Amino acid sequence: MTGTKNATLLLVFLATIGSGLYSGAKGQGSATLQTEKTTSDSRQTGALSFEFFKTRVQPIFLKNRGEHARCYGCHILSNRIFHLEPLSPGSTDWSDEQSQRNFQSALEVVNPDDPPSSKLLLHPLAPEAGGDPFHSGGRQFASQSDPDWLAMAEWVRAVLAEADTDSASHPLIRIYVTNSAGDTIDAVDPATNKVVQVIHGIELPHGIAFSPDGARIYVSNEAESALDVVDRKSGKILSKVPLSGRPNNLTITKDGSQVLVGIRVKSGALDVIDTVSLKNVKSIPVDGPVHNVFVTPDGRYAVSGSIESKIATVVDLQSQQMAWEVKFDRSVRPLAFDTNPDGSTRRIFVQLSGVHGFAVVDFAKRAEVERIKLPDQPSGFGVAEGRAGIPSHGIAVAPDGKSLWVDSTLANSVFEYSLPDLKLIGHAELPEVHPVDHAPTGAIPDWIAFTPDSKLVYVADSALRLVSVIDAHTLKEVARIPVGEVPKRMNTLVVP
Ligand code: HEC
């Protein structure tokens, strides 16, 4: 989505809200159909963001916040940018109509091309916390973790998400990021590298997968030991399917008929959720509590890994039984696969605790055949962060099958290897954390995702509330996307 288009959408959206009537851009030639569709979409969800504004954002403008003068006190002046309606005599809150006008005023200080730079967020924020140098109303928010400031930031993202909803051309591509220490999931549009949707209400979200048609999102919910089923367009949670224990990661069969959820309890199991009945129909026992689970690219097997038992278990998806397993000397972390020319699985690349590199398992031999160590340079990270025990967490094969990407916490980088020969191509450096009182630390990279054309690589910088976007060709970081708290797992959705 281009900036201009985005601005246009926001205007259409404003007009709709303002008049309360459908007012599509009739008579604009060939653009009409597209605009009408967008308008009705925006309107539907526009109601949501107005509600959010009225209940969560507007009260901030009236509230006594510590030693600060209230926004209301100054911003009711008629010539003020970001004008607020004066309350009617005797009332303590705005009417719906007044709220609509406040809503429009607030939209004027939202930047549709770059939500984080919206004046609403930056002007009242302390400069030390990244805000504008001066606001006559003072440093209303000392930091970006002030709950009131966060509510405004959430609203700004929701507004933009609405303007965007499905207006994009197809195929629709989104990179979803689960924020492992929060209760949000962010969806990034790789055309703009901006967050265009935030899903709320899943505390401790772990893994994420999609129905093949993109209508539904499945999330393993650690806080409630459930599989949450989300309507992708609206972001609403449709159902919570109880699991046999606390989950970690999940995966979905290629035909979309079953979601397999790794259960991180003593005995270890893969819960099988039927996506039609939305029932937990079976628990396949595996060796040890499950951390991650993946379906092989040919769709025939599921492979799970255990931190506790140090075993990777291969499950035959036809018989739904354990087929074989590989035992390691270290805890099993994320896995990735490459394939033979006929599409069958050739190797499993296995990350292990305490190993700055990965093990290579030959799928036909059912055994580890090689262990690749990542380069010693760059280095210097991971110790101050207390993460040296998991030097490398995050490994993935690009969609074109030509390269393997491996995160390094110690190098604060992601390394690229060619496939099938596993030659080191190079690395891309990740951003640093700059605390005020000690040396810079690392981003603690966690998960890797790609655009379907393999041109952009997304790395979750878990220590920075960011996702780094790497150009796969130049190995340079081309964008940083602010997301939620401790972003970890990611997955790419493609709606045909
Ligand atoms: C003491 C008066 C005062 C208070 C209190 C106040 N403001 Fe302001 N605000 C101003 C003035 C004056 C401006 C015009 C620009 C400037 O001088 O900073 C302004 C500008 C702004 C702008 C627009 C910046 C632009 O350039 O478009 C925003 C947004 C804003 N304030 C938000 C807030 C919010 C949110 C609060 C409450 C949390 C608040 N203000 C509290 C006086 C105030």
Image (tube, rainbow, N blue to C red):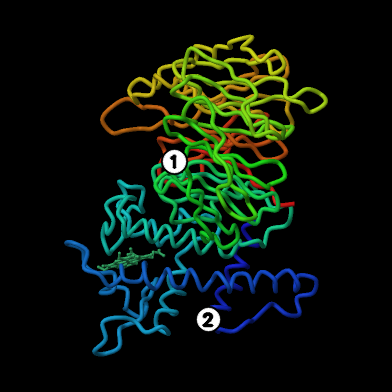
Query: On the rendered structure, is 352 left or right of 433?
Result: right
* Image-quadrant location for residue 417: top right
The residue singled out by tag 2 in the image is 18
Which image quarter is the N terminus in?
bottom right
**How much space separates mark 1 and mark 2, taking CA atoms?**
48 Å
- Name the element at disc 1: loop
| Of the pair 472 and 280, the residue shown nearer to us | 280
**Residue 445 appears in view:** no
Residue closest to the far bottom? 89
* Residue displayed at 64% across by 81% down: 23
Label 2 CB less than 8 angstroms from ligand 1: no
Tag 1 near tag 2, CB within 8 Å = no
- Name the element at disc 2: helix
Mark 1 surroundings within 10 Å by alpha-carbon count, few (fewer than 14), some (14 through 19), many (20 or more): some
Query: In the displayed structure, would residue 277 be above or below residue 35?
Result: above
Query: In the displayed structure, would residue 274 be above or below residue 292?
Result: below
Residue closest to the far right? 342
Query: In the displayed structure, would residue 216 be above or below residue 308?
Result: below
Of circles 1 and 2, the one toward us is: 1
Label drawn at residue 462: none
Label 1 CB less than 8 angstroms from ligand 1: no
**Residue 335 appears in view:** yes
Give x and y (percent) for residue 97.
43, 85
Give x and y (percent) for residue 446.
49, 32
The residue singled out by tag 1 in the image is 245
Mark 1: amino acid:
Gly
Sequence-wise, the earlier of marks 1 and 2 is 2
Ligand 1 placement by image quarter: bottom left
Give x and y (percent) for residue 397.
66, 28
Mark 2: amino acid:
Gly
Query: On the rendered structure, is 482 left or right of 364?
Result: left
